[in-house]
Structures are given as C-alpha cells and as structure tokens.
C-alpha cells in the first residue's frame, strides 16, 4: 500500500533520512523504531504530506504521494495540541471538514465517537476546561474521525496515562481489524511486540533493519535454549556450551545453552529430562527490545 | 480552495462570536470619539498656559505709555531706568522678561531684545512677536494720522468660503477642514486596522505554533491555504466591524440631520442661504450636515475599502510570516519594527499631506508606494483624486500584495515547523529559498 523508495532528506548539510526504503502492507501495523534524533519524525512528516523528500519517492497505492491523498491519511504528531478556546464539538468538526468531510457527515461521526468514548456531556465544553486525559481522547478522535485508510501515529502512547494508552491500543487494533493500515513510531517495545506486524529500526538517519516482527526476531536466534530446574545441584555436561551466567538459588537453577550445529534440541531435552528436575525448557529468541538495544548500541 | 473557505469560516466565526468583539464594535467609536474629544478639549483649554507674564517694556517711543495694559497673557509694564534693578527682578522672578526696544519708528523689530531667565517656547515667542508687530503697526498708522475709529471700522472679519463646481455645473460649498477631517479619520482607521488585525493574524499563527496544533493542520491543508484562510478570515472580521461602524455613524448622522431640519424649516430660510448665516447655531449645524451629506460617500467608501483591503492584505501576509517564524510573541519585536516603519512613516506623511497640499508631488509619490499608499491615498480621496491615479496605485498595491503573499507563504511553510532557536532575517531568506 505504501512504498518508500530511496528517500533522502537534508536539513542544511545534514542528512537526516539517508536512503530509506520501506514497504507497508495494507491492513498491517508497522512499527518505526529508533532512538531520539534518528530521523523517524522527519520520515513520518513526509508520509503525512507535511514536508517533501529531497530525493526519492513515496507511493500511495502505486501513485506518487500527494496532497490529493490527504483525505485518506490520519496523522497524530508527537507534539500535539488543540485550540484551547474552541469547544470539543467545534474542534472535531473543524478538523473533519479540513479533511474534506461534509459537515453533516462529520456531525454524525462526532456523535458516534462521543457515544463510543462516553464523552457526550463534554461536547460543548471548551478544551481549556478539559483534563489532560480527556484532551488526549479528543486528540485521538480528531485523527481518526474521517476514517483514514492510512493512520500515522508518532509516539501515540507518549503523554497518555495507562488507561488512555490502553484505550488507544484497543482503538488501533479495532482499526486494523477494519482494514486500516497503521504506521507508528514508539520507544515502548512492549507495544511493538504486542501490536506490530512489521518493524523497521532507523538509526542516525539510516534504516538498519526491517521485516516482519517474527522473522526479525528469528533472524537473531542463535540456537540458544533456556533450561530451568527445580534443584540447584544440576550440572550441565561440558559438551553443551553455556551461553549465559548461571542463575542458581535454593531449589532452583537456570541455564542458557547454545547448541552447536551438530547438536539437536532433542539431545539437550533428553539430558534435561533425565535429571528428573526439569521444570522449564524453551528456545531463546531475542525480544525486539533486546534487538533494538543491541543494534543501536553496536552501530 | 475549499480549505481556505473552511479556515476562513473558523477564523471569522470564532472572532465575531467573541464577546469582546461585540462589545468593542459598539464601544470603540464611543471610546475613540471621547478620546479625541477629550484631547481636543484639553488642547484648547487645559494645555494652554494661563499664567500672566509680566514684561517690562522700555523704548524710545510712546508704546510704553500706551501699552501698560494686559494683552492676552502678557502684562506690559514700563521698565525702570536702572538696568540692574531690572536684572535683579528678573533674577528673583518678580518679572518674567524685559523687552528692550531701541527704535520703534522703523518697520523692523530687529533691534528689539527680550531678556529672560526662563526661555519662552516657540509658540509663546511667536505670540509675543505678533502682539508687538500689531502694536507697532497700529502705532505707525496712528503716527501717519489714521485715527483709532478708522482702524476699528476697517478691521476685516471672517474668511473665504470655498465653492466647488460639480459635474452638473452646480455650485456647492466646499469645506477643507471637513475633508481633511474625514481623510484623516479614514487614514487613522486603516492605520489602526492594519496594526490591530495584522497582529491578530500574527498572534493566531503564533498560537497554532506554540500550541502545536499546526502540524495537524498542515497535514490536512497546504500552509498557503492556512495562511490565506487566516488572512482573509480576519479581513472579513475587520470589514464587519467597519460596516457596523458605518451603519452606526450614518444612523447617527442622518438622525442628527432629521433632528435639526424641522427647526430650520420653521425659520423659513432656504438651505442655500444658511451657509452665509453664521449667527444661527442651528443653521450652522445644518450647513455642516449638508456639506457632509454632499460629499461623494459612495466613491470615498469604495476607494477606502479597496485600499483598506490592499493595505491590510499586504501587511497581514508579512505579519503572518513573522508569526509563523517565531517561537513566542516576545520574539516578534525585532521583525515588527522594520516592517511597521513604512506604515508609521506613511501616517506621518498623511498628516502633513492633509494640511498642506493633498494633490502635491509628495502626496502623489507616497500614494503610489505600496507600503505607504493605503494611508496616504485615503487622506487624499475627499479632495478628489483622478480615477487613473487611484487605479494605478491600487494596481501597484495589489501586485505587491500578491508578490508578498508568495514570499510570505514560502517563509510560513518552513517557519511554521521550525522550533528552537530564535529566527533571524538570514533564516527568513534561507527558508524562502528552501521551499
């Protein structure tokens, strides 16, 4: 659905997006990861038609992305705000109208969301009278009111309290189930694993890896297995390589073993089983958090 | 284009529905009128220095004998012979000045000296000069054998009345003071509106930037549309307010006209005769209203609106760009001063144009320069400006506006997403080239 092809963006002489290519499939959730200042927001702004690339192309349904696609895009920037003196309803109607929705249709949508989020009684309040959490809800509604097919969320969970963060998470899943393509950037890796189908890590303006979340994780699998025993007396035979420091306590010991190419997991399991104290056996696939930290700190 | 309309509507409605706007629309004319009324009242009464100045006068002529009485605020006294006594009295501030006139029987006052402790102001000195000249002139006439009775009977009163011929060949009274007054008020309105509404546009841009709303907006509309929606929306607010003021003033004007007319009717004096009858207060009022009503208001208002819009659009697009570039309102000053200087300068020119020559070269030149033309041209309108000149000036103004919008939109586009350091003129230039 969205193809980013060899994008370059410069600020003065500094290259903030350096030859970035991505492909976001329809109806999926794409996570854009990277440390602060990596160039995520710059890329997101180009996808949201706020700025243009200096070089390269962005395709939206195989067409070069342009302002005509604005009605199909919903964008919630990291730095967000609303008109403090406007009422909730006026604000939502204004944003919807800017996205090209007819006022009468926009009114219907506003009503629907007000009911769904149980905020009907706040409709005629000015934004400055609302709590921060309430304003956050309104902000999110204003982003999706026009039913975008491509939703861009820059750090959607930052600044949200846990209750609202969960609400946003549920709404994101809902929208995905309805066929919306979603791109979001975040620092919170738990959300990434929970929500994303695909990810890309950007560091110092360059894409350092991308792919489907499970295949990315598997690509970092080093044939390691975690074993947990209900005894502290278990010793691992020397032909198995211990990968991690051993954790032992009274009546418990944990090991991570890296198998060689000639060794099979069954072999390790057989040994463990015979100790009669095995309580846990699982392959160790690094989490996105571990991959992220590892990739960013080594490059 | 649809988005410009959506933004225009929002900018217009949020402002017009605002209570402050409604109150100010009705209150501002009253406030301005009372401010000016107060200022004029103070200028004619309070500002005047009523202290009586004692002036010793010594001369070889008879003037000292004649002029021992008070003229205006000067009390002329015959000077003692001893210079030191005079100096001492001046020093002790018992006497304000000593006017020493060596030879009065000549047509020059060059030999006259005024010895003072505290200098007189320019106006005070010129008043004193006038008093002295009149007195010497009278003295010289009397010496030539012309009696006081003849002098009194030949004193001229009143002044010239101007009469204009209109297109139909009809004659009508022309009142320069009235025209100057109207021109000045119109220039004042444009000057104030540009600043008030221009900075409204600027503040709106700053608000969107500091509240971080702008990124959401520019993901929905082109920055140019956002800027134009804002500029045009606020322009409509200004026009609405202006229209309300026109309706209020016309209502008031014709109300007064109706109120005075029946009284005059009863006297049986034909209106055209009223201009010469200075003794009737009612007739004078009617004369004024008639002169006011005889002004080509259709022409004045239409030209005013053209220049009001042109001037406002030109300046507010610059203000919008400044608003988009800065991070907070306090950063605005360094950019506002050079931008508003031409307007302030134009207003000063407009003031001198009104009272000197509304159709002179200075007036013509500055009513062609787009940054000053909105205020200078409107001052000239009541005096009659050829349509060709109005058209040329308006064309230059609107062409400059289009060019400025193009430049400002470029600065606006980049500036609006720039946070952090305070921008400089160099940044403006860079952003302009960048987008």
Image (cartoon, rainbow, N blue to C red):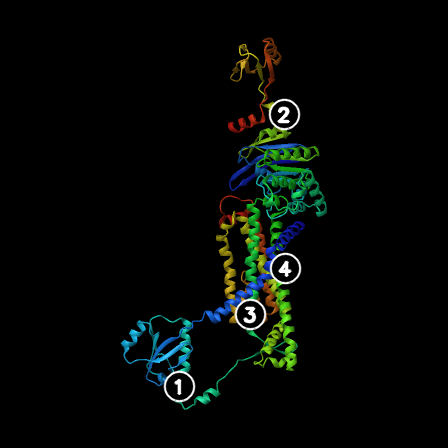
Q: Residue at x 57, y 62 (%)?
A: B190
**Quadrant housing residue B127:** bottom left
Chain of the residue that carries numbered disc 4 in the rendered image: B
**Residue A26 in view in this figure:** no
Distance (Cα) linking label 1 and label 3: 40 Å
Distance (Cα) linking label 2 and label 4: 62 Å
Q: Nearer the viewer, residue B338 or B81?
A: B81
Residue B400, given in percent of the width and then of the height, sits at: 57, 58
Chain of the residue that carries numbered disc 2 in the rendered image: A
Location of residue A158 with respect to B267 vertically, above or below: above
Mark 1 on the same chain as mark 3:
yes
- The earlier-in-sequence mark between 4 and 3 is 3
- The earlier-in-sequence mark between 1 and 4 is 1
Distance (Cα) linking label 1 and label 4: 63 Å
Distance (Cα) linking label 2 and label 1: 116 Å
Which residue is tagged 2? A214
Q: Secondary structure at mark 2?
A: helix
Query: In the rendered view of the protein, which quadrant contains the N terminus of chain A?
Result: top right
Q: Residue at x 46, y 69 (%)?
A: B46
Residue B62, given in percent of the width and then of the height, sits at: 35, 86
Q: Nearer the viewer, mark 3 or mark 2?
A: 3
Left or right, B90 with respect to A27, comes to: left
Residue B348, given in percent of the width and then of the height, sits at: 50, 65
- The earlier-in-sequence mark between 1 and 3 is 1
Which residue is tagged 1? B139
Q: Residue at x 60, y 78 (%)?
A: B283
Chain of the residue that carries numbered disc 3 in the rendered image: B
Which residue is tagged 3? B181
Q: Secondary structure at mark 1?
A: helix
Distance (Cα) linking label 4 and label 3: 23 Å
Disc number for residue B240:
4
């Amino acid at each position: 659905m969205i193809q980013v092809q060899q994008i370059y963006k410069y600020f003065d002489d500094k290259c903030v997006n350096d030859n970035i290519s991505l492909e976001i499939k329809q109806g999926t959730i794409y996570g854009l990861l990277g440390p602060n200042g990596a160039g995520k927001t710059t890329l997101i702004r180009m996808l949201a038609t706020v700025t243009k690339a200096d070089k390269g192309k962005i395709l939206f349904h195989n067409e070069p992305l342009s302002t005509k696609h604005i009605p199909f895009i919903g964008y919630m920037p990291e730095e967000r705000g609303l008109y403090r003196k406007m009422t909730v309803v006026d604000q939502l109607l204004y944003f919807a109208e800017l996205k090209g929705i007819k006022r009468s249709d926009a009114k219907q949508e506003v009503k629907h969301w007000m009911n769904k989020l149980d905020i009907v009684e706040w409709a005629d309040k000015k934004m400055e009278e609302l709590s921060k959490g309430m304003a956050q809800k309104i902000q999110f509604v204003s982003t999706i009111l026009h039913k975008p097919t491509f939703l861009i969320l820059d750090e959607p969970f930052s600044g949200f309290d846990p209750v609202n963060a969960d609400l946003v998470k549920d709404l994101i899943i809902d929208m995905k189930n309805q066929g919306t393509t979603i791109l979001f950037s975040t620092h919170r890796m738990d959300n990434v694993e929970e929500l994303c189908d695909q990810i890309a890590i950007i560091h110092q303006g360059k894409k350092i890896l991308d792919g489907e979340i499970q295949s990315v994780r598997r690509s970092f699998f080093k044939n390691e297995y975690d074993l947990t025993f209900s005894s502290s007396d278990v010793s691992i035979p020397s032909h198995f390589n211990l990968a991690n420091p051993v954790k032992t306590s009274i009546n418990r010991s944990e090991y991570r073993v890296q198998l060689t190419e000639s060794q099979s997991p069954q072999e390790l399991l057989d040994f463990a089983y015979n100790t009669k104290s095995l309580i846990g056996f699982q392959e160790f696939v690094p989490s996105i958090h571990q991959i992220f930290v590892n990739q960013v700190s080594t490059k | 284009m649809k988005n410009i309309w959506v933004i225009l509507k929002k900018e217009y409605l949020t402002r017009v529905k605002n209570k402050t706007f409604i109150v100010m629309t009705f209150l501002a004319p009253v406030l301005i009128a009372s401010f000016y009324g107060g200022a004029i009242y103070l200028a004619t009464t309070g500002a005047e220095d009523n202290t009586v100045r004692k002036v010793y006068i010594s001369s070889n002529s008879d003037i000292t004998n004649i002029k021992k009485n008070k003229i205006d605020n000067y009390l002329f006294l015959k000077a003692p012979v001893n210079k030191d006594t005079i100096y001492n009295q001046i020093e002790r501030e018992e006497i304000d000045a000593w006017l020493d006139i060596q030879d009065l029987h000549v047509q020059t006052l060059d030999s006259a000296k005024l010895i003072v402790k505290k200098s007189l102001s320019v106006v005070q000195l010129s008043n004193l000069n006038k008093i002295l000249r009149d007195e010497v002139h009278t003295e010289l006439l009397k010496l030539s054998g012309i009696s006081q009775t003849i002098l009194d009977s030949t004193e001229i009163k009143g002044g010239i009345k101007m009469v204009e011929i209109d297109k139909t060949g009809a004659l009508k009274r022309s009142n320069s003071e009235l025209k100057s007054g109207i021109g000045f008020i119109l220039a004042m309105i444009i000057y104030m509106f540009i600043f008030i509404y221009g900075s409204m546009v600027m503040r709106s841009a700053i608000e969107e930037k500091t509240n971080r709303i702008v990124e959401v907006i520019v993901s929905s509309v082109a920055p140019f549309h956002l800027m134009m929606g804002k500029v045009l929306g606020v322009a409509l607010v200004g026009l609405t307010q202006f229209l309300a003021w026109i309706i209020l003033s016309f209502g008031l004007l014709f109300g007064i006209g109706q109120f005075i007319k029946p009284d005059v009717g009863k006297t049986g004096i034909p209106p055209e005769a009223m201009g010469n009858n200075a003794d009737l207060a009612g007739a004078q009022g009617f004369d004024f209203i008639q002169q006011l009503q005889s002004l080509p208001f259709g022409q004045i208002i239409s030209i005013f609106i053209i220049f009001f819009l042109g001037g406002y659009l030109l300046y507010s697009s610059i203000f919008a760009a400044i608003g988009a570039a800065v991070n907070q309102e306090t950063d605005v000053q360094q950019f506002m001063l050079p931008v508003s200087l031409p307007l302030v300068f134009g207003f000063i020119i407009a003031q001198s144009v009104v009272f000197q020559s509304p159709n002179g070269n200075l007036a013509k030149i500055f009513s062609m320069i787009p940054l000053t033309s909105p205020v200078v041209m409107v001052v000239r309108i009541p005096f009659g400006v050829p349509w060709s000149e109005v058209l040329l000036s308006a064309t230059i103004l609107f062409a400059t506006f289009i060019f400025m919008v193009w430049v400002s939109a470029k600065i606006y586009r980049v500036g609006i997403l720039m946070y952090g350091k305070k921008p400089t003129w160099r940044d403006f230039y860079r952003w302009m080239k960048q987008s």
